[in-house]
Amino acid sequence: MRALSTRLITTLIAAAAVMTACSTGTGSAQSDAAESGTPAAAASGDQGTWPRTIADEQGEVTIDAKPERIVSTSLSVTGTLLAIGAPVVASAATSVSDITDDKGFFSQWADVADERGVEVLYPDLEFDMEALIAADPDLVVVSTSGADSVLDHYDEIAAEFPTIVVDYSKQTWQDLATQLGEATGLEGEAQASIADFDDYAATAAQKITAPEGGVSIVSYNGPGSDQGVAKLTGPHAQLMESLGLDVVEGPEDLDTSEQPRSDFIFVTLENLSKAVGGETVFLLTGTEETVSAFASDSVLANLPAVQKNQVYPLGPTSFRIDYYSGKQFVDAVVDALGA
């Protein structure tokens, strides 16, 4: 497993800042939609057609009625469920760290989870079937990959509850929101959150002055580790380009990845200067400390971005793009390049 993947497992991939905190500061996706008159306002009161059969990573799952008690065993998916206003009653939690609250929920959406009464299903991502049974869900969400995956327990879970299995690693957060919207009867809310995000990015793009020489997105992991450089087919590069920036992707011939990836290539530290083609660098999961370490690395001293002092952090939540972390990603770019 490459350096970025290890990092993602360490921090548990995924995450985000609360949809309503970013747009209105309070409330849920449904209330935002109702106030703004979006199509989701009507959809929030529409139960749709039930039962319905949903395609998922295990084939298909039939859901008898609109879910009212959803449990997420995937911390990385919980944020998207909250973004579409899904009735999440409990979620798996990770170990407490500087990117979580004191319960192990990602800090970017922890407040909205508290407002909606979301309980910890089990801590430290240690699967607990008894806790799941006690939560009494009418829909369980399971992911296929990542440190928060409990796919090994799928048969046990599915024998008790309707269970949808998703793969957030191969699709955008918008695609995931659309899939979950269909499964929960919240199609309108899902589309409203996507539209809101697109509007947010479009507004931000007007504040940005694109630097000459293009930009590179780098996962800088320091000596002794492989380094990631974004590819144009990945969500990070796609979001950056939606802001009007020209992303220079990492060259395939330097890629040391054991398996093909659509988001990043991986290179040795010695080859990082060859792989970084942009004259401006944004550091994935980067902070000001990361920027300092990158700029002071003697191997990278000749990079134009270092020489021009054009190295910027994307923040600790930027490892995965979803509604919440995506807005923080956009804010970081505006902070760096805004007029």
Image (spheres, helix red, strand yellow):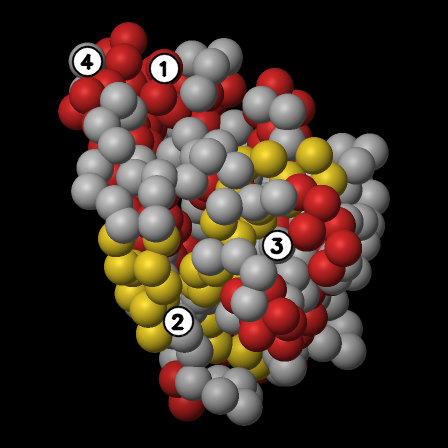
Q: Are marks 2 and 4 in contact (CB under 8 Å)?
A: no
Which amino acid type corresponds to the residue marked 1 in the rendered image? Ser
**First along the sequence among labels 2 and 4:** 4
Q: Residue at x 35, y 21 (%)?
A: 30
Position of residue 269 in the picture relative to residue 161 (left or right):
right
Which of the 4 quarters of the picture holds residue 62? bottom left
Which amino acid type corresponds to the residue marked 4 in the rendered image? Gly
Q: Secondary structure at mark 1?
A: helix
Position of residue 174 in the picture relative to residue 276 (left or right):
left
**First along the sequence among labels 3 and 4:** 4
Q: Is residue 309 above or below residue 250?
A: above
Q: Is residue 41 above or below residue 224?
A: above
Q: CA distance from mark 2 to mark 1?
A: 31 Å
**Which mark is on residue 31?**
1
Which amino acid type corresponds to the residue marked 3 in the rendered image? Thr
Q: Secondary structure at mark 3?
A: loop
Q: Secondary structure at mark 4?
A: loop
Q: Are marks 2 and 3 in contact (CB under 8 Å)?
A: no
Pick the front one: 266 or 179: 179
Q: In this figure, which residue is indicated by the disc labeled 4? A: 37
Q: In this figure, which residue is indicated by the disc labeled 2? A: 57
The quadrant in which the C terminus is found is top left
Q: CA distance from mark 1 to mark 4?
A: 10 Å
Badge 1, how many Cα within 10 Å: few under 14, some, many 20+? some
Q: Secondary structure at mark 2?
A: loop
The quadrant in which the N terminus is found is bottom right
